[in-house]
Image: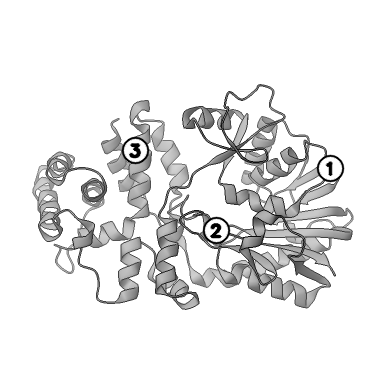
Amino acid sequence: MDSRKAVIEFLEGFNPAKNNLSDMREKYILNINEKERGKFYNDITQVVRNYLLLDYMMRIPLKKKQNVTRNNRAVIFAALNEIFFSSKPEYVVNEYVSYAKQKREKGFINWILRSILRETNGKLENVKPPNNKIREISIKYSFPVDFTVKLSEEFNKKKTIKIFTALMQEVPSVFMVNKFSKSRSELNCKEILPDVHSVCDNKIAQKENKEGKILLFEKASLFPVYLLNARENEKILDLTAAPGNKSFMIYNLVNGKIDLTLNELNKERLKVMEHNIKKWNMDVQLTNYNGKNFPKEEKFDAVFIDAPCTNTGVIAKRPDVKYKLKMSNIERLNKLQIELVLSGLELLKENGRLVFSVCSFLSEEIKEIVNEVEKRTEFKAIVDDIPNLLTPFIEDNYIRIIPTKKNPIGFEMALFQKK
């Protein structure tokens, strides 16, 4: 299957507010010529990243209640993506009209695309924006209106645009060589942090990541592990561990000289983690408890909690996340996050420590958790003895990494100890 046809088929069955982009994209890639997989991946990611903008442009020539079939929408979105982000307009229109399923639809698609071209001359800056400024930002960067409102209220419109611009970027991956792999990695790439390398050959890196020779990740996801600062011979619990990536980092950084327990409630996610642990050749314990009710008999030197969250910090990597955002869910997530931390604190030895982290940058998912935990326990969030790498991100008594062009991944974390 050629990449264009695959993009159209994919978009016919994909709803960004419901479907998981990563899972569906990986499934489709297997049916595409290997040489065209890169183009398919990039095109799909770009369409999803700009989904609201493409929908807005598609509606420029339409009458108010005029509907578009799923197939026609898929063809139009794929064509608009190439018109405004890749190829020459005339060439793209002629090519994409041929992908209409029915002959009578060819004229409709041709009319839509050529009407948009006449209106905009094939340039994004000529797309007439909505009159409302918040709506304009929402459409231009393809973020839901309520999320745009929220960020504009916390920061301001200018700062919101900077954050959205960062979240529209590609995210460079880094990797850590698996010290316990049965076969050696072929990669010889630049070390940018201790045991962490930039990717100098993406094809080999993807292959070795699947084989367990290395772990690919985004640099910011390592920061909570640095905050934990695991030491050899410690007994550590990762309370919400699946798929196990951060557990791998903890284990690898201390050369496996650690008593590490990985817990996961969801049995499907637990199976994925079991597969990963075997692939990585790690000697750890796996448990299947609700993190809020983990047995209190056993005590640990440290507890690590990478908690369920809104995932706003990883939108650059997973653009479909922004269409699933519901600000009304934050209160429910806060309740779960606080319960997990309170449970984890009960599992600590005397003088033990707990690291809480979320791949989000919303203040509600760190500030409210820290305030509630400090109000209800003897533990305090501290920032007076943390890695130098994290000090630029200190906000009050926790760490908050807001996405920027230089670092498009957001994270929040806190280190709790008794004071």
Earlier sequence position, callout 2 versus callout 1: 1
Whole-percent x and y of residue 90?
A: 11, 44
Q: Secondary structure at mark 2?
A: loop
Residue 91, quarter of the rendered image: top left
Colour mode of the rendering? one colour
Residue 216, quarter of the rendered image: top right
Which one is closest to the eye, mark 3 or mark 1? Answer: 1
Near mark 2 (Cα within 10 A), the count class, few <14, some 14-19 or many ≥20, is many
Whole-percent x and y of residue 7?
A: 31, 41
Q: Is residue 2 above or below residue 320?
A: above
**Which residue bears the numbered disc 1?**
232
> In percent of the image, x 66 and y 70: which residue is there?
335
**Which residue bears the numbered disc 2?**
410
283 vs 351, left or right, is: left
Earlier sequence position, callout 3 versus callout 1: 3
380 vs 137, left or right, is: right
Quadrant (top left/top right/bottom left/bottom right) for the C terminus: bottom right
Whole-percent x and y of residue 64?
A: 17, 69
Mark on residue 40?
Answer: 3
> In percent of the image, x 78 and y 45: which residue is there?
261
Near mark 1 (Cα within 10 A), the count class, few <14, some 14-19 or many ≥20, is few
Question: Alpha carbon of mark 3 to alpha carbon of mark 1: how far?
Answer: 44 Å
> In percent of the image, x 88 and y 53: which residue is there?
298
Residue type at tag 2 = Gly
Q: Secondary structure at mark 1?
A: loop
Asked whether 275 or 232 is in front, the reply is 232
Asked whether 21 or 249 is in front, the reply is 249
Question: Alpha carbon of mark 2 to alpha carbon of mark 1: how far?
Answer: 29 Å
Quadrant (top left/top right/bottom left/bottom right) for the N terminus: top left
Q: Is residue 6 above or below residue 381?
A: above
Residue type at tag 1 = Glu
